Image (spheres, rainbow, N blue to C red):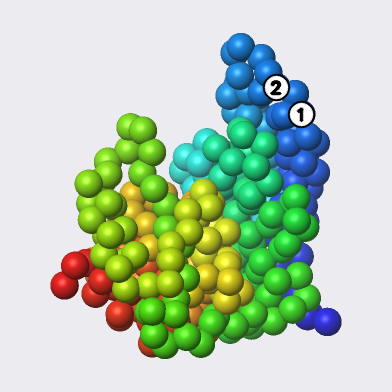
Amino acid sequence: MAQTSALINVMTAAARKAARALSRDFGEVEQLQVSRKGPSDFVSAADLKAEKTIYEELAKARPGYGFLMEERGEVEGTDKTNRWIVDPLDGTSNFLHGIPHFAISIGLEREGVLVAGVVYNPVRDELFWAEKGAGAYLNDRRLRVAARADLRDALIATGTPWHGRPGHKQFLEECERVIGVTAGIRRFGSASLDLAYVAAGRFDGFWERNLSAWDVAAGAIIVREAGGFVKEIDGGDFLKTGAVIAANERLLPLLTKTVRGA
């Protein structure tokens, strides 16, 4: 059985507490679908409620740590070296349509370095977690990225820019290039779970642009601790640019070259 640190216990407890309310709310979505107004306001309330729970739990457990959260934005703490990076509901569109593929994502950045991450899908009760130097796990099982070395055998995940987001043309061009050299592409609608699935070997790679730090912080450290690599597509800082690519050591340069169109 995997031994969890006090830090991971704190993060897991916050995620599970928020997940209890999210799961109850998710059970109401199907009924809300029949209304003329639709469930958008309901989901926003569920999102905010989950974030409030996570904020309160983490602030109580680690007073002074800063926060970067999807709804609250930047919250400065007295401890300038530690910052939580939180997405209380990654996969909002899935949640909105009653699709059981969404997650709570909590990452910890210390002095600018990602040191711990938790990605929790409450519907499947799958808790992906990692701490720097301690490995990556799915519940109690140690994770390793897949060992495939040929893009022709690789299943790659991505995300599609939706209405109002930039980059549609670029995405279609990248998608066409990747489809042409791989075993296939999947678009599941939750970047944190896409990265967790790379760590678990379910996907061989992942790329997406125009993400936010809270979409990828936790997933990135989980991939790295599972033996994979996560980088910015064009060589910058993916927490700032939101352009992320992940795979094992052999596939990463091949996938990066394909996505860039080199």
Where, quadrant-wise, is the N terminus in this rendering? bottom right
Asked if 129 appears above or below 47 in the picture, the reply is below
Q: Is residue 187 above or below residue 199?
A: above
Spot the residue most to the left.
Answer: 262
Label 1 is placed on what type of residue? Answer: Glu
Q: Residue at x 69, y 54 (%)?
A: 121
Where does the image place residue 103, in percent across and percent down from the top left? Answer: 63, 51
Marker disc for residue 28: 1
Element under disc 1: helix
The residue sitting at 39% across, 48% down in the picture is 160
Tell whether 114 sits left or right of 38: left
Which quadrant of the figure has residue 233? bottom left
Q: Amino acid at mark 2?
A: Leu
Question: Looking at the image, do the residues carrying marks 2 and 1 touch, with CB atoms under 8 Å apart?
Answer: yes
Residue 32 badge: 2
Q: State the image quarter where residue 56 is shown.
A: top right
Q: Residue at x 24, y 74 (%)?
A: 257
As drawn, the residue found furthest toward the right would be: 1
The span from disc 2 to disc 1 (Cα, nearest Å) is: 6 Å
Q: Position of residue 198 (x, y in %)?
A: 53, 71
Which quarter of the figure has residue 208? bottom left
Front residue of this view, candidates 84 and 244? 244
Residue 241's disc is none
From the viewer's perspective, is residue 256 above or below residue 134? above
State the count of labels: 2
Q: Secondary structure at mark 2?
A: helix
Q: Position of residue 25 (x, y in %)?
A: 75, 33
The residue located at (75%, 23%) in the rendering is: 31
Where in the figure is residue 149, as x and y percent of width and height? Answer: 42, 87
Q: Residues within 10 Å of mark 1 (few under 14, many from 20)?
A: some
